[in-house]
Amino acid sequence: MIDIDAVDFFMSDKVLHSPYEYLATMREQCPVRREPHHGVFMVTGYDEAVQVYNDTERFSACVSVTGPFPGFPVPLEGDDVSATIAAHRDELPMSDQLPTLDPPLHTDHRALLARMITPKRLKENEEFMWRLADRQYDEALTGGKAEFNGSYAGPFAMLVIADLLGVPESDHAEFREAFHGGQAGTIGSTAGESLPHTPLSYLYEKFTGYVEDRRRQPRGDVLTGLASATFPDGSMPEVIDVVRVASNLFAAGQETTVRLLSSAVMILAENPELQERVRADRKLIPGLIEETLRWESPVRGDFRLSKVPVTVGGVDVPAGSTLMLLNTAANRDPRKFPAPDEFDIERPNARSHVAFGRGVHACPGAPLARAEAVVSLTRLLERTSNFWIDEEKHGPAGHRRYRYLPTFMLRGLTRLHVEYSE
């Protein structure tokens, strides 16, 4: 059995590529356990994670995307550190982003997102997805081989979000070059090449220009709807508030969707019998997507900061403690999912996973990601008669060489090379 105290979850290359033995061992010892290297309370149990996700009174999301790095900027002492959090949260990285906000500010900004992205707009966007999938597969499926992430999943996910938010099609090529012209580091990354700009600074600049232009000259288009969205009380948000919400959806939606798509394709490519079942019955695709989300969660976990002393899973957690809610572990908790390490496309409770989080911070783009996966997998199955792992790139079965994103926040392949027959 693995010695979990000897392993630094946040820095270990072995755990980066294969985390499940470490997480299962930790959960077996206690579903809430403080790791010794950075003092983070690791929440590996399903019920315990859901408890914390749903409790915004006693836990703050201010460290949700950074966790212990760099950590809170000042000491958090006493039995209630809420005032200290409020006074210093703006000093944390990404403190203006939706995932790091707490109610009631989070409530207003989340509602602003809902007013931007209406059911009608989502329906129009789904119609665009089918056309885009064909166009992107035209580009990706040439010569019997493809690197799925770079040739299809990345550009597809980016252009779906661009269309949803109304980015003019004349700017799509610029956005694609900005986000897929090279391989960049990402949230929680310990490595990666740098872009000439940060993704958020680029998005802030672009969406500020769009929103200011549409407020000056409304045009009846999607960006005008974005620019004119109001808070629940009817007040008009500052331009930067609209820009922050739109930019967060744009950036976060791509990351998780690309990982979901590549994991699902890898699973089908590694399992010929399963691929044949899904080819024969496309109604199995939604179940495949949910089990993929459970089995290989695109987000490894989320962080919270305890405001007051609290007990989670029978463990006393002091005020000011950092907790990591490990989706990858909760989704393989045998108390919730029997035989959790088996991939079961017909698992009856697969959709109970926490891959998209829970509570007020549950991923607002979850329906979009599911729709993108249905469209992408359906079209891939229609346009190929078979696809399998490229052994020249990834090695033979049983000895695969996959590389995963060098980040403690996300879980996903950097590249997925496949071969296919039409």
Image: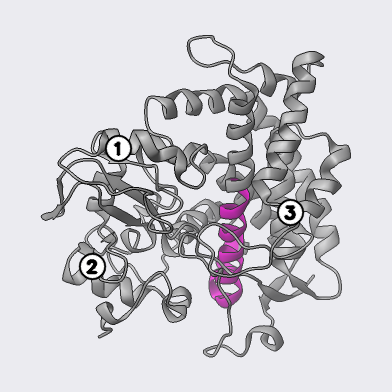
Question: Within 10 Å of the Cα at label 3, are there few (<14), some (14-19), or many (20+) other Cα atoms?
Answer: some
Span of residues in magenta: 253-278
Q: Which mark is residue 56?
A: none
> For the residues marked 1 and 2, what is the alpha-carbon distance in whole angstroms?
32 Å
User: Total number of numbered labels?
Assistant: 3
Residue 112 can be seen, yes or no:
yes
- Which label's residue is closer to the chain start, 3 or 2? 2
- Is residue 34 shown in magenta? no
Q: Name the amino acid, label 1.
A: Thr
The kind of secondary structure element at disc 3 is helix
The kind of secondary structure element at disc 2 is helix
Q: Quadrant of residue 102?
A: top left
Disc 3 + disc 2, Cβ < 8 Å: no
| Percent of width and height locating residue 40 | 29, 61
Q: Name the amino acid, label 2.
A: Arg
- Which label's residue is closer to the chain start, 1 or 2? 2
Question: Within 10 Å of the Cα at label 1, are there few (<14), some (14-19), or many (20+) other Cα atoms?
Answer: some
Query: Label 3, on which residue?
Result: 179
Residue, x 48% and y 10% (percent of image)?
Answer: 233
Query: Label 1, on which residue?
Result: 84
Disc 1 + disc 2, Cβ < 8 Å: no
Residue, x 33% and y 56% (percent of image)?
Answer: 324
